[in-house]
Amino acid sequence: MDIKVLGPGCPKCKEVEKLALDAVRESGVAATVEKVSDIKEIMNYGVFSTPAVVIDGEVKSVGKVPSKKEFLAWITPA
């Protein structure tokens, strides 16, 4: 699983990155978490508000800090 946290490095972006790492560790899912701060790369996802979360190429959240419960629902198999 490939998780990208999109954002320039603001406090909320850092919070989402920590949340992503915590959720992956808690769930035991094999995933990489990457912080993307390049504005052009962020815009390639059609994202104009950060922080944003992209999982396996699909934008899951834009412009807010998701809850840990939301994050776990995205990354754990149903």
Image (cartoon, rainbow, N blue to C red):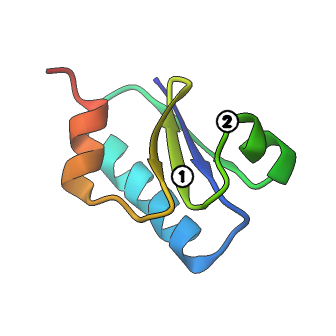
11 horizontally vs 69: left or right:
right
Identity of the residue drawn at 23% across and 29% down: 76
Identity of the residue drawn at 35% across and 42% down: 24
Identity of the residue drawn at 46% across and 61% down: 16
Q: Earlier in the sequence, mark 1 or mark 2?
A: 2
- Residue 52, percent from left and from top: 54, 52
Is 62 placed above or below 30 here?
Answer: below
Residue located beneath label 1 in the image: 52
Question: Label for residue 45?
Answer: 2
**Quadrant of the frame with the C terminus:** top left
Q: Kindly state the secondary structure of the residue where label 1 is placed.
A: strand
- Residue 14, percent from left and from top: 56, 68
- For residue 37, what is the image quadrant? bottom right
Identity of the residue drawn at 73% across and 45% down: 42
- Residue 40, percent from left and from top: 85, 45
All told, the count of numbered labels is: 2
- Residue 22, percent from left and from top: 35, 54
Q: Kindly state the secondary structure of the residue where label 2 is placed.
A: loop
Report if the CB atoms under discs 1 and 2 are less than 8 Å apart. yes
Question: Is any atom of residue 62 visible in this view?
Answer: yes
Which residue type does callout 2 highlight?
Tyr
Is 67 placed above or below 58 here?
Answer: below
Which residue type does callout 1 highlight?
Ala
Is 6 placed above or below 28 here?
Answer: below
- For residue 27, what is the image quadrant? top left
Q: CA distance from mark 1 to mark 2?
A: 10 Å
